[in-house]
Image (cartoon, rainbow, N blue to C red):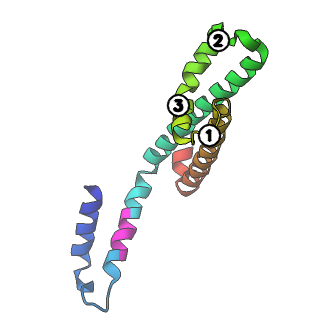
Amino acid sequence: MLIVDAIFVNVQKYEHFRHPSHVKWPFVAIYNIASIRLQNKWIMLLAVLVLKSLLELSLMAIAGRFVLGLMAGAQRRGNLFWQVLDIAARPALGLTRRVSPSFVLDRHIPLAAASWLLVAWVLMLALKIELCATAATACR
């Protein structure tokens, strides 16, 4: 609704550009929409930080499962910490199993999940850096 209001205000403000040779008003409206988005960068930054934290949590759960599996061996299923880490990693592993083709073995699913989680984490980190660079006051 805010974007529609911004476009309507800009159309009224720049009505003298309605002549076909002057097509500036849509670009001015887009610029003003971008400035409204710049004012709300902290909301986007909060969303990016929450998503980045969830990705980190899933990555650490998968890494913890791996390390604990190496230490515990065959008795890992009865280990309480293994069960906690398994519950924390289950959403990422389940999503990876659904998305991956059927010829991918179940033992490779944690590696595939860690790979796409790592890629998503790097993308969130890049987005966070970009948001902090454009709105430095939100990152202080």
| Residue range (magenta) | 27-33
The residue under label 1 is which amino acid type? Phe
Q: Classify mark 2: helix, strand or loop.
A: helix
Residue under the point 73% across and 18% down: 69
The number of callouts visible is 3
> Which class describes the residues within 10 Å of circle 2: few (<14), some (14-19), or many (20+)?
few
In whole angstroms, how far apart are the C-alphas of marks 2 and 1?
25 Å
Which mark is nearer the camera, 2 or 1? Answer: 1
State the mark number for residue 94. 3
**Mark 3: which secondary structure?**
helix
If you read the primary sequence from the N terminus, does the residue marked by circle 2 or circle 3 appear first? Answer: 2
Q: Quadrant of residue 59?
A: top right
Q: Which residue is mark 1?
A: 103
SS for dot 1 = loop
Give the amino acid type for the residue marked by disc 2 in the picture.
Answer: Arg
Tell me: residue 30, above or below residue 21: above
Which amino acid is tagged 3?
Gly
Marks 1 and 3 sit apart, C-alpha to C-alpha, by 16 Å
- Asked if residue 24 is positioned above or below residue 114 in the image, the reply reads below
**Badge number at residue 77:** 2
